[in-house]
Image: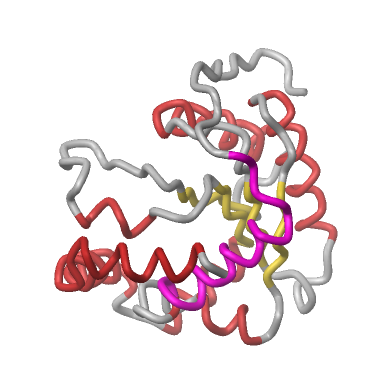
Amino acid sequence: MIAGLTLPRMIMPPSTPWPSDDVAIAQTRAWLTEIVIGLELCPFAKPVHVKGQIRYVVSSAEEPEALLQDLLNELHGLVDADPALVDTTLLIHPRALPDFLEYNDFLSVAEFAVEDLGLLGKVQIASFHPGYLYAGNAADDLANYVTRSPYPMLHLLREESVDRAVSVFPDASQIVDKNIKTLRSLGLAGWRRLMAGVLQS
């Protein structure tokens, strides 16, 4: 653990049975291929997917303290791994932080962990959650769905890889606006059809 951190307290019990690790990974991979890559929401995702450089890890943590330990382990693991084999890690945690506000509070803990390990400038964390909600947006605004995933997860990325990818896409700053237009054109019914297919994986 990291001294001085106050972790969010989970107050919501799980509403559905936990998926097996294999199911969680299969559904996350289907979400990546069918939605993230299929809708071209992230032009950086396809190369690492095709090369098999994504590490999928399912945390069994049910409390933030245990999730933090898994995060610390995966941060070390990513830095120590050969980038040609593991370029990025998806830490999926179906049991921990199902409530988005609690998850959002945990993100500051995750960022502190990166800093405490001396990994600023080396690793960054992107966030995905099935209940993602951006400040000022209505809950059903499709803009929120750009970062909605089957399960809560933390995406660990190498800064060098991010910089390299951005250099190839000079209009990277416009990706978010394009993604919002794509999802709003798809509509809520279209999103639900895609996600239903993902959850059947």
Q: Which sits in the foreground, 141 or 22?
A: 22
| Location of the N terminus (image quadrant) | top right
Q: Indicate whether 127 appears above or below 160.
A: above
Q: Residue at 19% across / 47% down in the picture?
A: 140
Decide whether residue 35 is among the magenta residues: yes
Image side of residue 53 versus residue 33, left or right:
right
Residue 133: name its quadrant.
Answer: top left
Image side of residue 75 versus residue 103, left or right:
right
The prevailing secondary structure element of the residues shown in magenta is helix
Q: Residue at 71% across / 41% down in the picture?
A: 71
Q: How is the image coloured?
A: secondary structure
Q: Residue at 40% across / 28% down in the picture?
A: 101
Decide whether residue 29 is among the magenta residues: yes
Residue 78 position, x and y percent, is: 76, 57
Image side of residue 158 versus residue 191, left or right:
right
Residue 195 position, x and y percent, is: 40, 64
The magenta-colored residue range is 17-36
Q: Which sits in the foreground, 98 or 166?
A: 98
Q: Residue at 45% across / 55% down in the picture?
A: 149
Q: Indicate whether 36 appears above or below 95.
A: below
